[in-house]
Amino acid sequence: MNMGHKNIAALWVLLLTKFLVAVSQSPLANVPAVIVFGDSSVDSGNNNKIATILKSNFKPYGRDFDGGRPTGRFSNGRVPPDFISEAFGLKSSVPAYLDPTYTIKDFATGVCFASAGTGYDNATAAVLNVIPLWKEIEYYKEYQAKLRGYFGEEKANEIIREAVYLMSLGTNDFLENYYVFPGRRTEFTVAQYEDFLVGIAENFIRELYGLGVRKLAITGLVPIGCLPLERLTNIFGHHGCNQEYNNVALSFNKKLDKMVGRLNRELPQAFLYTTKAYDIFNDLIKNPSKYGFEVVEKACCSTGTFEMSYLCTDENPLTCSDASKYVFWDAFHPTEKTNRIITDYVLQKLRETLA
Ligand SMILES: *[C@@H]1O[C@H](CO)[C@@H](O)[C@H](O)[C@H]1NC(C)=O
């Protein structure tokens, strides 16, 4: 059979068109905005504006951020949503909703409702007087109204539907609440508490879905027993990782995965995805040198064992000079380099899922 050049060209056009249609149907095509819920792992400065002692809008926080600016991110530089936003061709950082220097026009391409110290459990947010998860949704509803007011119904709905939403929390429910105060421990076994939190996560996702959210990535827990602060308090474990906490993280993640899988099948047009942040975080704690890290047990800031928020001050002469050698920036939070590695891995796994 002799296909003329014309036919071959037509075939190419057909294949190319098919390819482009397939790409444009991918949940990651034409993402207009990255919208964030959660805790300090993703907060970009909302706590600056509320009455809590859990803040990081002072030096040395942000010393490797654009302009060396402390923004309220709990790191020396950017946090994962910033890298994700950049990967979608959007802004290189996602602004905090409560930051008055931004307008709805800025927030239309990305906004963060997260609050350091919060959790799924209302009682967790109460510990340090931060924004509870239900309030993050209230802010999100207010944002939707502003979006509709500014862009009109149709355009606003498109942004809401096509945006990629991120959700990252749960660590504080265990480490700032359950294992610290007796309240929830007298009510729930740890397994029951996991179920309680997953139940709240499910309601939260259903509520977002009801508000028009379709593409949502959920990050469960990382190896929380290996945070420097948890090593410090693991006296009987010779300051190694707290294995019990890591096991809680794994079992919580499993339950979260199962619930998310179920909702994915149940909710039409929903693309819900649980990230594999635990795996990459665990690998870089176990094999730091593979990633160019030199220190994993201690953080860069101050003694690196317990300091965070106001205890991580610019006056401490012990703070390291090169944070990129450290997995952790303060006793509870990763360095920018760790955040970047985690994000790259999460996005790569996500693309493999979609391929
Ligand atoms: C958390 O508090 C809000 C506001 O008071 C309430 O509506 C919600 O039901 C509470 N959530 C849980 C799980 O108790």
Image (tube, rainbow, N blue to C red):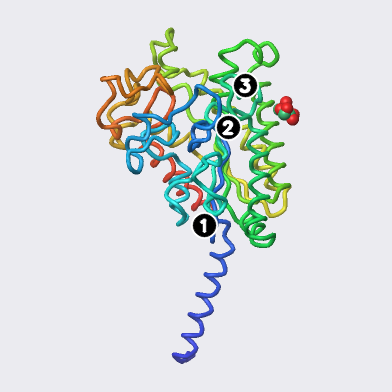
Ligand 1 within 8 Å of disc 2? The answer is no
Task: Name the amino acid type tagged 2.
Answer: Asn
Task: Name the amino acid type tagged 1.
Answer: Ala
- Viewer-proximal residue among 232 and 52: 52
Disc 3 versus disc 1: nearer the observer: 3
Asked which quadrant contains residue 174, the reply is: top right
| Residue at 44%, 90% in the rendered image | 5
List the residue tagged with mark 3.
126
| Residue at 43%, 7% in the rendered image | 236
Q: Residues within 10 Å of mark 3 (few under 14, many from 20)?
A: some
Would you say the residues marked 3 and 1 are in contact, meaning their CB atoms lie under 8 Å apart?
A: no
Q: Residues within 10 Å of mark 2 (few under 14, many from 20)?
A: many
* Residue at the limit of the structure toward the front, as seen here: 100
List the residue tagged with mark 1.
355
List the residue tagged with mark 2.
253
Distance CA(mark 2)–CA(mark 3): 24 Å
